Amino acid sequence: MVKGNLFVISAPSGAGKSTLSAELLRTVPGIVYSISVTTRSPRVGEVHGREYYFATEQEFFRRRDAGDLIEFAKVHGFWYGTPKAELEKTLAEGQDVVLDIDVQGGRQIKKLYPSAILIFIAPPSIEELEKRLRGRSQDDEATIQMRLENARKEIDAAGDYEYLVFNKEIPESVFRLQGIVWAVRSRMRMDLLAKLNTAKKSLV
Ligand code: 5GP
C-alpha cells in the first residue's frame, strides 16, 4: 500500500532542477530522493550511488527486462530508469519520494501512480536557458543544441503537469516547491480525519 507521497519533478536541462531538488530535500524533513540508473558516464564530482547508479547498457537492459525499473526512457542519447523496489519500499515506510525524471518518465509514473504529483520547473525563457547551458561549460556545442531542442519538446509536454514553477530566482522557487509539498501533506485524508475526530472527542 502506498503511504508516502510521490513527487515527480521534471524540467529541461539547465532550468535549475538539481539545485532546487537539493534545496527541497535539505529543507523539508521526511522526503527522499530516488536514485536512478543511467547508462551515461559520471560527470566530474558525481558519485555512483549518490547522483546515479551508473551502469553499462547491458546491465541496464538486464534490469529493465527483469522488471526492476518502474519506468525508463532514453534521454539525450542515454538510458535512464527508476529502480522499483527502492521506490516501493520508501513509499510503504510512509516517506515522501522525489523523482527527478524527464517528461516521458513523468507520464509513465502518472499512469502507474495516479496520485503522483507532477511538478514542472521551467526556465524564465529559452534565451535564459541557452545562457545557463553555455555558462556551465559542461557540454560541447552539439550537446547544447540537442539539449535546447529537447527543452522545446519538454516545454510542450508541461501541460500534463499539475504544478508549474518558473525558476527566476532560486529562493522563491524553493519556497514554491516547499509550499507544494506541505500543501499536499495537508490534504484531507481518511487517516487524518480519524485523528481529527479523536482530537474532537478529547476536547468536549
Ligand atoms: P542528466 O544526465 O543531466 O542528469 O539528466 C538528463 C535527464 O534525464 C534529466 O531530464 C533527468 O530528469 C532525466 N532523468 C534522470 N533520471 C531519470 C529516470 O530515472 N527516468 C527518466 N525517465 N528520466 C530520468
Image (tube, rainbow, N blue to C red):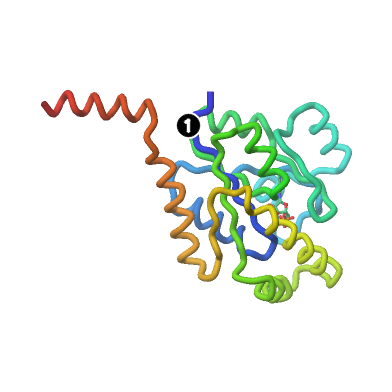
Name the residue: 67% across, 50% down. 51
The answer to which of 137 and 13 lies nearer the viewer is 13
Residue corresponding to mark 1: 94
Q: Image height check: is 43 above or below 25?
A: below
The answer to which of 18 and 186 lies nearer the viewer is 186
Name the residue: 47% across, 31% down. 94
Report the amino acid beneath label 1.
Answer: Gly
> In what element is the residue under mark 1?
loop
Outermost residue, left direction? 204
**Residue 88 percent coordinates (x, y):** 60, 29
Whether residue 192 sits left or right of residue 44 in the image: it is left
Residue 66 occupies which quadrant of the picture? top right
**Residue 152 percent coordinates (x, y):** 73, 62
Whether residue 113 sits left or right of residue 152 in the image: it is left
**Residue 175 percent coordinates (x, y):** 44, 59
- Looking at the rendered image, the quarter that the C terminus falls into is top left
Q: Bin the neighbour count of mark 1 within 10 Å (Cα to Cα): few under 14, some 14-19, many 20 and up.
A: some
Name the residue: 54% across, 43% down. 117
The answer to which of 108 and 7 lies nearer the viewer is 108
Q: Image height check: is 1 above or below 153?
A: above
Residue 122 occupies which quadrant of the picture? bottom right
**Residue 148 percent coordinates (x, y):** 76, 66
Q: Image height check: is 40 above or below 69?
A: below
Disc 1 CB within 8 Å of nearest ligand 1 atom: no
Q: How many marks?
A: 1
Name the residue: 85% across, 43% down. 56
Outermost residue, right direction? 58
